[in-house]
Image: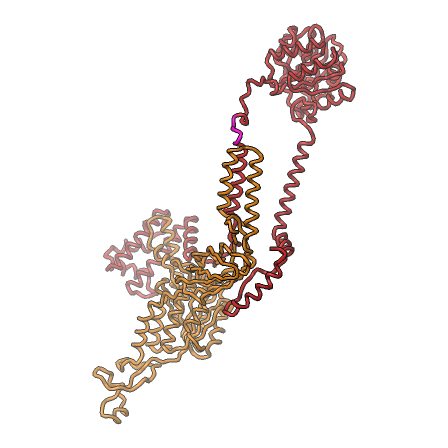
Chain colours: A red, B orange
Amino acid sequence: MTAPLPAAIESTASALAVPESSNGPVFQAENSTPRQRLAHWWRHWRFWLIVGAVFVLLSVLTFLAATSGNRSLDALAINNPAPAGAQAAASVLENQGVNVMATDSLAKTTAALSHNAYGASTVLFYDPRNILTPAQVSELAASVEENGSRLLAITPGPLTLKRLSPDFSAAGSTAGSSRVDAGCTNADAQAARSISGGGTTSALNEGPPSGTLRLYKGAQTCFSPASGSSPAGGGLLASNSSGDIFALGFSGVVNNHYLDQAGNAALTFRLLGSRPELLWYTASLNDIPPAQSPPSLAELTPTWMFPAAAWLMLVAVVGALWRGRRNGPLVQEPLPVIVKASETMAGRARLYQDARAVETATNTLRHASMTRLAHALRLGHGAEPAAVVEAVAIASRRPSTQVHAILLGAAPTSEKDMLTIAAELAALEEEVARR
Amino acid sequence: MAISGRFFFLALAALIPIVAFPGLLTWVLAVSVLLLVLVVDVALAASPRQVAVRRTLPSGVRLGEPATAVLRLFNNSSVMLRAQVKDGWQPSAGALNALAQVRIRAGERAALNVDLLPTRRGDLATHHATIRSFGPLGMAARQHTITAPGVLRVLPPFHSKRHLPSKLRKLRELDGKAAVQIRGAGTEFDSLRDYVRGDDVRSIDWRATARRQDVVVRTWRPERDRRVVIVLDTSRTSATRIEDESALDTGIEASLLLAVLAERGGDRVSLVAYDRRVRAKVSSTGKGNMLNAMVQGLAPLEPELIELNAQGIAGQVRDVTAHRALVVLVTSLDAGAAEEGLIPLVTTLSQKHLVVVASVRDPALERARLDRSTSTLAYRAAAAEFALNRREAITAYLKQAGVEVVDAAPQELPPKLADLYIRLKAAGRL
């Protein structure tokens, strides 16, 4: 196919001398080297090859860009720079020498706690979807106590709250206010002086929805909303009697959007930055006990299933290549333009109908009938309409007033009238023709 | 490159070992076996580039009649060619067996008969022959398309030739007619023959009678060697379809019948297909078979989507003959087109020539006129009456200008035009 081609062509040229003697030209593949053929192939497919290459390149680049950033979209995640994330707080703490470590399951958290030195850890516990069972919360609280760590629970639910420490109790919720003063003796709260409680600030509308703010009561209750909207006297921050477990009722204090408002930053950094190790624990699906999850599809299918399915896909591609390969290029059929002759008539009829041109249509019908009747009764081209009416009345044995009404009567006002006249005209012509 | 169904089923069969011994190794093994088969078969296939092609095409075929195109293949390679050959006829050529299987030994040839049943008039083309050469296993093939153009001219069907015998008989009746025929102007002396009872006594040739014992009468025949110029309009109005046939096709049928009749009647016929330029021009003054030349000339005609240049027609007629002639315009009487060009043209032409306008009438108008059962149909009837009325007015105007008009449905136009010709000839108006 490649090297011996020129020689072969020469030999065929001599062989072709014999059939050339009979009439008609001999057609043959043009003599071309593989290089020319390659060039031709490239010219033919250049556009699609370049488009395909650009598409693949862009896909790969997009994929790399999407996965390389290691960003999260979860609320209060330490690698989420969005307003709802908490990358700001985490990175500030890290710069200040606190070792921040994100965990996503209870097992990992307790393991990390026991690994750290006694009293060297702070745990941030955030469970927005209430995944943890009360028993698991108790386990976390016990582990924290055993290790002598601090725990900051962010917006814990009422059931969770009881398990964290018996000192806590839920005190309802509030819609939030722009600024809440500390109003307690806790050193961290006093250092912060006041926190922004979401609520009515204009900035709130732009930020992530803060939802309802939860109020807690504990051994020490801080940041009670001043207006007394909570008669039970709960606050946004509560701590237990030993002062190492806190419950914070507003996640905005920690997140990127509200961190720079009022004393939010001060409270956050004091609560989370007092120990060298910070475990940033966000409850996830990993906390659901594995016994509860159904067996995966891979465990149920037999071993040959995957290779067989993949092979069938390959066979499908082979089948497509088998059936899809054309026998030569497409052949074009030059079609002449042929238009149906009655289309102008149909178009005019639709125009009449759309305009409801009852009068015009009836006039046309009457005129045509009149001409034909005059011709049938041999009255000549220039016959008077009245004379035609008289002749038709005699020929059809109808009263001449009736014939006059049909042929020269008043213009119809509705389609129904037009239809009646049209039918009568046809009947009249038939009667005259039958005569 | 192409693969066959055999290769597909081989790939499907490889599913059995893959299910029986699941694992990557089996998979890779199966793929390599398939690739090996592919490469070996392609390598052993004869090169389709080494095949030469020659065509033998019939010179012309009437529409509706079958034809056979022969495709000759020469295998110039050194191996046997097992191939699928596709002749690239356009669809309206109606190639029944365009795809054929051939086996040609090295250096030998084969002829493929491709049966054609054309469905359209005109020049139908094939541009290439594609050769798909399979290897000895019949699994994979090399494919190449050889450019091998060929053209089959499909001639107009001339269905109206079935009217020819009866019209010719009528024409012969005119010829050499007895003296009972009225002696009108323009009739020519034919011969002398014996008086038969019933002959017109006024046609007795007394000189001849004096020379012989019997009474001798003169006979007359219609004049001969008159010019008939048929102008076929191929402009936009000929693109209308009436009763499953384009107006141009009906015009061709009518022109052919008239031309054959007029040639047998001893007249000289010229045919011009014209819109803004001459599309075809045939004259019976030339040597050879007039009908064949006409059919060959009319075959590739197609309606052109341009307006008719009416002034040009007068020039074309002057070009054909300087004398008085019967000018037959095969065109359309539709309002608009006719008012713009036809009427001025015909009034000038009719000063010198005898002009006949032949036009196809749409029977759909007549049907629509009579159906008035619903309001939509009544509007339709009114529109049809309007169109017929306009047509009637144009016809009346033309007749007033001394022009003969033949306005008939597609099936009736050719015989009616022929009848008109015979009538004009009998009346000696040519």
Q: In front: A24, or A42?
A: A24
Q: In front: B130, or A416?
A: B130
Residue at horizontal 40 percent and vertical 79 percent from the top? B226
- Lateral position of residue A7 relative to residue B240, left or right: right
The C terminus of chain B appears in which quarter of the rendering? bottom left
Indicate the position of residue B135 as horizontal and vertical percent values: 52, 51
- Lateral position of residue A320 relative to residue A57, left or right: left
Residue at horizontal 55 percent and vertical 65 percent from the top? A15
**What's the magenta bit mostly, secondary-structure-wise?**
loop
Indicate the position of residue A33 as horizontal and vertical percent values: 63, 57
In this view, A306 is above or below B229: above
Residue A233 visible (yes or no): no
Residue A23 visible (yes or no): yes
Q: In this view, which residue lies farthest toward the bottom? A: B211
Magenta stretch: give its range. A300-304
Q: Is residue A268 magenta?
A: no
Q: In front: B121, or A361?
A: B121
Q: Quadrant of residue A252?
A: top right
In this view, B429 is above or below B372: below
Q: Quadrant of residue A164?
A: top right
